[in-house]
């Protein structure tokens, strides 16, 4: 009798073990569970926004022809000498010749000037590319581009066959020609200086003054939409200087995101150029149909502010570090959010302290009231309510 009872107990244990093993194999295999690790999640939203600038427009209408002494995007100080304006046709023709020489000089600084005879594959690749550019220029009737491409090809063939680019001699000759042309320019000109320091831009875009700093802190959703419909219109008779340390970024976001922050809240702006810039929330509009306008100020250097106006950026409102687990793994039990964790051949639930949650993932505090441990295996899929009802 005792032997039969003993055998029955052994059989029950074996059946239970087989059942539990099968259950764990089916439910904890492959993608049905995750291993707990520490990660970081962020409340982020990608938007298309509008940059409000502190900018000063400079009038160039004092003559027909302009010669700039700096490039777009250059940083300039206040009262910098940035351009001269000429009015005579003769000066205009000379400036055209100087521009052509400047373009040739720029071409001499291209990547391939450092090539040697050992860089055979690169040289051949550049030659093939420039031959295509030459024929494109010829077919389109662009004589200037064809001439420049011819010069590049000459340099490349010189490097290929002799190992010398002859660029040094060519540069000296071009500089000599440019100096001679500059000496022919008349003294009848207007010199242009900057009213403030910042980023130099050789053209205006037509948005100057459309939205100032005051308006950006009271704009409505409807008014923002109207501004975003406007098209840029470049003006050749104006240039400007843009303050790269004082600017605003305003955009339209879901009202749900607006609740993640408040006035004076900190936001990270990741520009389409990959710059990560910190900002402060200055204004949040009244919601309209689930959307609102948020205006963020920054005093950080933004190198792309010269030409940027309407631009894509990613806003990060908050970051959370902890155990990141799929939200579907969580169950509500006795007013606690719990997950089921592998424990030997069984599953047991562990309480968690949730820091953040969305439809996909939940971030759990690694300490505090959390019973979950690093590297626990958490069951993700399946209805497990029968295990604790």
Image (cartoon, rainbow, N blue to C red):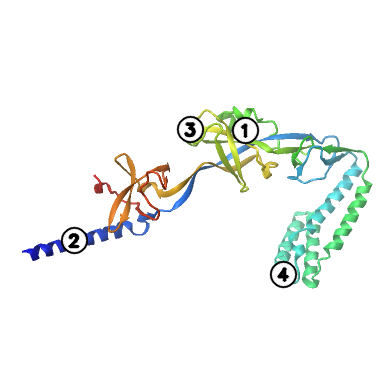
- Residue at 25% x, 58% y: name it: 20
Q: Which residue is mark 2?
A: 13
Rendering coords of residue 366 (x, y %) = 42, 48
Closer to the camera: disc 2 or disc 3? 2
**Location of residue 236 by image quarter:** top right
In which quadrant is the N terminus drawn?
bottom left
* Residue 237, horizontal then vertical, whole percent: 79, 37
The mark nearer the N terminus, 2 or 3, is 2
Labelled pair 4, 1 in contact (Cβ < 8 Å): no
Q: CA distance from mark 2 to mark 4?
A: 74 Å
Q: Earlier in the sequence, mark 1 or mark 2?
A: 2
Q: Which residue is mark 4?
A: 119
Q: Residue furthest front?
A: 368
> Percent x, y for residue 233?
71, 37
Determine the secondary structure under disc 4.
Answer: loop
Query: Looking at the image, is mark 2 or mark 4 nearer the viewer?
Result: 2
| Above or below, 132 relative to 247 | below
Q: Which residue is mark 1?
A: 227
Q: Nearer the viewer, residue 7 or 123?
A: 7
Sequence-first disc among 3 and 4: 4
Distance from disc 3 to disc 1, alpha carbons, whole Å, reads 19 Å
């Amino acid at each position: 009798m005792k032997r039969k009872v003993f055998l029955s107990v052994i059989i029950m244990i074996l059946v239970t073990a087989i059942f539990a093993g099968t259950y764990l194999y089916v439910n904890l295999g492959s993608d049905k569970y995750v291993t707990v690790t520490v990660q970081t999640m962020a409340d982020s939203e990608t938007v298309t926004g509008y940059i409000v600038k502190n900018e000063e427009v400079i009038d160039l209408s004092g003559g027909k022809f302009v010669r700039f002494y700096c490039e777009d995007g250059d940083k300039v100080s206040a009262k910098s000498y940035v351009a001269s304006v000429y009015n005579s046709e003769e000066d205009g023709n000379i400036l055209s010749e100087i521009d052509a020489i400047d373009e040739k000089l720029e071409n001499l600084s291209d990547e391939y000037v450092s090539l040697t005879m050992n860089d055979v594959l690169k040289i051949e690749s550049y030659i093939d590319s420039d031959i295509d550019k030459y024929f494109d220029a010829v077919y389109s009737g662009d004589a200037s581009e064809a001439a420049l491409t011819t010069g590049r090809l000459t340099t490349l063939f010189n490097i290929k066959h002799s190992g010398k680019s002859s660029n040094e001699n060519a540069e000296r000759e071009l500089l000599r020609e440019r100096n001679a042309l500059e000496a022919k320019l008349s003294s009848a000109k207007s010199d242009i200086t900057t009213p403030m320091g910042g980023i130099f831009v050789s053209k205006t875009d037509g948005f100057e003054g459309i939205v100032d700093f005051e308006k950006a802190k009271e704009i409505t959703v409807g008014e923002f939409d109207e501004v975003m419909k406007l098209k840029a219109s470049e003006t050749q008779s104006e240039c400007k200087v843009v303050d790269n340390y004082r600017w605003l970024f305003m955009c339209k976001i879901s009202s749900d995101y607006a609740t993640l922050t408040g006035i004076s809240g900190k936001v990270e702006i990741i520009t389409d150029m990959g710059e990560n810039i910190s900002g402060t929330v200055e204004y949040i509009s009244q919601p309209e149909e689930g959307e609102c306008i948020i205006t963020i100020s920054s005093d950080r250097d933004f190198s792309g502010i010269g030409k940027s106006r309407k631009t894509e950026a990613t806003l990060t409102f908050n970051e959370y570090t902890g155990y990141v687990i799929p939200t579907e793994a969580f169950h509500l039990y006795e007013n606690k959010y719990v997950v089921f964790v592998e424990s030997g051949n069984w599953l047991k639930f562990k309480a968690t302290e949730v820091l953040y949650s969305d439809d996909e993932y939940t971030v759990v505090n690694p300490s505090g009231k959390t019973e979950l441990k690093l590297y626990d295996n958490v069951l993700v899929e399946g209805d497990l309510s029968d295990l604790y009802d």
